[in-house]
Image (tube, grey):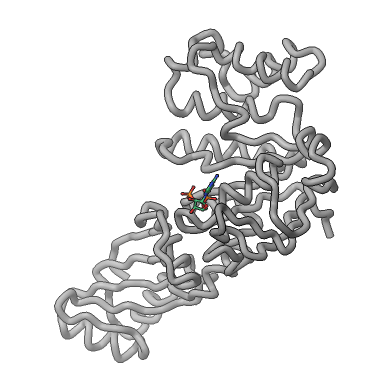
Amino acid sequence: MRRAAISVSGLRKAYGGRLVLDGVGFGVAEGSVFALLGPKGAGKTTTVDVLTTLTRPDAGTVRVAGHDVLTATRQVRAAVGATGRPAAVDDLLTGRENLRVVADRKRVPCGDRAVARLLERFDLVESADRPAAACCGGVRRRLELAMTLVGDPRIVFLDEPTTGLDPRARHAMWGIVRELVADGTTVFLTTRYLEEADQLADQIAVLGRGRVVARGTPEELRRRISGTHVRLRFADLYELDAAARVLAGSTRNDAELTLRVRVPGDAESGAALALLTRLDEHGIGAREFSVHSPDLDDIVLALTGERGTGHGEAAARRSGDGRA
Ligand SMILES: Nc1ncnc2c1ncn2[C@@H]1O[C@H](COP(=O)(O)OP(=O)(O)OP(=O)(O)O)[C@@H](O)[C@H]1O
């Protein structure tokens, strides 16, 4: 069992009489990736702010890197790096200068060498001497992350690290997060993309109405709402009838000539193939098939009754077509 990098229990925080966090609790194992998901205004940023000592909790116990955030603020700050306000990129400075400013603030020994290493590691050498304002989104995000990692913090907080990035830059960022974890860093992530949490997180906590409403691995969460289904489309009503008889319990749509079949959330990759094989054994061929996984909106809605912010962007949707 790995040690806890972060442990939170009974965390409460109100703003002007409005309770934002109402007894939040979770633990994050050292060297793991933890994702905090929740609809807009659920309190994700407030939680991160408490964990990084930017905001004082009203009640509860919050320990980060073994230190209490209220009584050992300095030690917590020395152990963590966070994207967002404290590491904000200065547009007028170059990437190298931005990194140097953070290194000086953190009193990192041999600052120039540390900066050069980070530029190299984050593929920022080419753009190092350009003003940050002239850099594209992916480069800026890498710079922001590099600034977060000045001084080699043991715990890194990433607030929506890939929002607004194109798929290539997003995948590059995922690679960086994986490298960090391979080096033993603990990553605390907030994201609106279920796919991102899926790809990166060992554990996910869903915040809703000021509480953690669900916790588990991405697969465990999927299973809880069991929304995964396979959709099969047939050439005509005759085939649809035959398939519906074979796949008892499926939902049919005569107008679209489709069958919708629920599958366990943890077996989706083989689910379509298994269904197609079963139909084939009865001499039935499907025109098209697609596997639909629940997205963040589905999960948040199912668990909290609140609509999330993913707008379906996060849908982990795989589809294919072909005859069985
Ligand atoms: N400094 C503050 N003063 C007053 N209210 C605040 C303050 N910070 C946050 N809030 C309120 O607390 C609630 C939770 O905000 P928070 O930013 O933590 O949510 P979030 O889950 O990060 O949302 P988002 O996805 O929009 O970033 C919101 O209703 C917000 O308006």
For residue 183, above or below residue 134? below
State the residue in front, 15 or 321: 15
Confirm whether residue 126 shows in the render: no
Left or right of residue 237, residue 158 in this image:
right
| Residue 300 percent across, percent down from the top left | 47, 65
Q: Tell me what residue is drawn at x 84 percent, y 44 percent.
A: 71
Look at the image and tell me in which quarter the N terminus lies: bottom right
Left or right of 46, for residue 135: left
Q: Quadrant of the C terminus?
A: bottom left
In percent of width and height, residue 219 lies at 57, 66
Q: In the rendered view, would you say 81 is above or below 126?
A: below
- Could you tell me which residue is drawn at 56 percent across and 24 percent down? 143
Q: Residue most toward the front?
A: 16
Mark yes or no: residue 135 visible: yes
Residue 226 appears at what percent x and percent y? 48, 75
Please tell me how many numbered marks the rendered image carries.
Answer: 0
Give left or right: position of 292 versus 225: left
Kindly identify the residue that appears in the image at 73 percent across and 15 percent down. Answer: 104
**Residue found at the very far top of the displayed protein:** 129
